[in-house]
């Protein structure tokens, strides 16, 4: 089970990293001269971080959340957080990485809370 979470986290982390970078470039109407290279780097960073965070968050927070919902919610939170971090990264290029993680964690906490409410636990 954990190996599957690592594999899915790697793939979806790469997708989330590339999507967040693409969304940030499209919204900022910035230069597309480094678009391909930036997308590859964002996907690589997302893959590495996704391979670590997916199993950790799945086992610690989202044990009672269906896998599909867990991955969709985490990816959406990561993409939104990463794109928002891009606009706040005036001097620090690692800001989108931290805000992407924060978005993923926030989405996970919301899903955890909803799962607890649905199960009748507070």
Image (cartoon, rainbow, N blue to C red):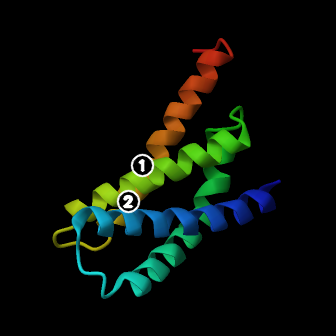
Q: Residue furthest left?
A: 90
Proximity of marks 2 and 1: CB atoms separated by less than 8 Å = yes
Badge 1 crowding class, 10 Å Cα cut-off, few under 14, some 14 to 19, many 20 or more, is many
The residue located at (17%, 73%) in the rendering is 91
User: Measured from the top left, where is residue 111 in percent x and y?
Assistant: 56, 33
Residue 85 located left or right of residue 102: left
Question: How many numbered marks, from 0 up?
Answer: 2
Quarter of the image holding residue 113?
top right
User: Measured from the top left, where is residue 120 in percent x and y?
Assistant: 65, 11
Q: Compared to 55, does 63 lie above or below? A: above
The residue located at (55%, 48%) in the rendering is 74
Secondary element under disc 1, as helix, strand or loop, is: helix
The residue located at (51%, 62%) in the rendering is 16
Q: Compared to 42, does 98 lie above or below? A: above
Secondary element under disc 2, as helix, strand or loop, is: helix
Residue where numbered disc 1 is placed: 103
User: Measured from the top left, where is residue 44 in percent x and y?
Assistant: 53, 78
Q: Give 88 or 98, whichever is nearer the viewer.
A: 88
Quarter of the image holding residue 11?
bottom right
Q: Compared to 44, does 82 lie above or below? A: above
Residue where numbered disc 2 is placed: 82
| Quarter of the figure with the C terminus | top right
Q: Compared to 119, does 75 lie above or below? A: below
The residue located at (57%, 72%) in the rendering is 48
Point out which mark residue 86 bears: none
| Of callouts 2 and 1, the N-terminal one | 2
């Amino acid at each position: 089970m954990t190996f599957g979470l690592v594999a899915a986290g790697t793939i979806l982390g790469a997708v989330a990293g590339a999507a967040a970078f693409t969304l940030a470039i499209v919204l900022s109407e910035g230069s597309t001269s480094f678009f391909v290279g930036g997308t590859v780097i964002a996907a690589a960073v997302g893959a590495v971080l996704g391979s670590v965070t997916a199993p950790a968050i799945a086992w610690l927070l989202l044990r009672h959340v269906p896998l599909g919902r867990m991955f969709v919610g985490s990816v959406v939170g990561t993409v939104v957080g990463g794109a928002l971090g891009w606009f706040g990264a005036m001097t620090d290029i690692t800001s989108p990485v931290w805000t992407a993680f924060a978005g993923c964690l926030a989405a996970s906490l919301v899903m955890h809370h909803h799962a607890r409410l649905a199960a009748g636990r507070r």
